[in-house]
Image: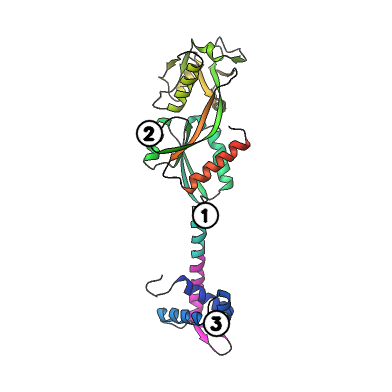
Amino acid sequence: MFPDAGFELRHLRTFVTVAKYGSFTRAAEDLHIAQQAVSQQIRGLEGGLGVRLLSRSSRMVTLTPEGSVFLADANRVLSAAQRARRRVGAAARGELGSLRLAYTLTTAWETLPVLVADLAKSLPHLKIDAREVFGGDIDALLASGRHDLALAPTTTYAGDTQHRTIRRELLRVALAEDHALARRDTLELATLSDQQFEIWPRDMAPGFYDTVVGICRAAGFEPSLDERGTGNTVWGYIAEGRGIGLINSSLIKQLPRGIRLIDLAHPQPTLTIEAVWLGHDASPAIARAIEAAEQHAGSHNWL
């Protein structure tokens, strides 16, 4: 409603239709309303504006000078209303708006870029704001509303979260090129029981930490962990021969010099990557992002 003039969008639509046909009768037919309703709406519109918009004769209806000016504005208002309707519909389908996406290092070199590219192609009007975070911060980031969705290795969360597995990646052994085991084609995980594992602290990367410890225990040993390194210092420690590491395969794309990756023998352990979001906040954009991830996972054997 336009409070000052006392008319609604339907009045504008009726006026524009009358101006288009130059006829109340044809306007009524086009709008599927009674001709009397058309006349009443036009009278109400003119009364609210305090001007005559149309000149009536027995043969035709024409615009007054004021009506010509008003027609241009009425068309703009109706176009804006239609655009708003389309945009809110797109937002309701998750095709428009923004998605604040948190991701951990494990997804940074392949999983995240692939999914963002998929979304950009299928949903070009959905803005993706992606930021790398520590896995240990995801609970707080989702709870505070600073992020809508997170990609991280599977773990437990304190909040009311939902999760969906989107990828399982093979884990491989990273060690110095001059390490005694570096010439092997494959390694049994149990042969690493006397090695020191370079790994981020659990409070920074709980999902990855628990995966490494879990598969070592499944292989029959308790791993010796060096948790002093963070970021690229872990790579440096491995390259120096201070210890070895387990990494998911896609991180080969950031592998520094001096380090070699070796496959683990069957059954090869994997790192499970999940999409995580608050259970009460399943927005259309989140649903579309998860849908895209599942489609890619199905077509590229991610699971």
The label shown at residue 158 is 2
The label shown at residue 90 is 1
Relative image position of residue 115 (x, y in whole percent)? 55, 39
Is 142 drawn above or below residue 134 in the view shown?
A: below
The label shown at residue 278 is none
What amino acid is labelled 1 in the image?
Ala
What amino acid is labelled 3 in the image?
Phe
The residue lying at 41 percent from left, 35 percent from top is 138
Residue 175 sits inside the magenta stretch: no
Residue 93 seen: yes
Q: Secondary structure at mark 1?
A: helix
Residue in front for this viewpoint, 162 or 224: 162
Relative image position of residue 277 (x, y in whole percent)? 44, 40
Cα–Cα gap, marks 2 and 3: 65 Å
Is 137 on the left-hand or right-hand side of 53? left
Q: Residues within 10 Å of mark 3 (few under 14, many from 20)?
A: many
**Residue of label 3:** 24
The residue lying at 48 percent from left, 68 percent from top is 77
What amino acid is labelled 2 in the image?
Ala
Residue 79 sits inside the magenta stretch: yes
Q: Residues within 10 Å of mark 1 (few under 14, many from 20)?
A: some
Cα–Cα gap, marks 2 and 1: 33 Å
Relative image position of residue 151 (x, y in whole percent)? 48, 35
The region drawn magenta spans 54-80
**Marked residue nearer the N-terminal end (2 or 1):** 1
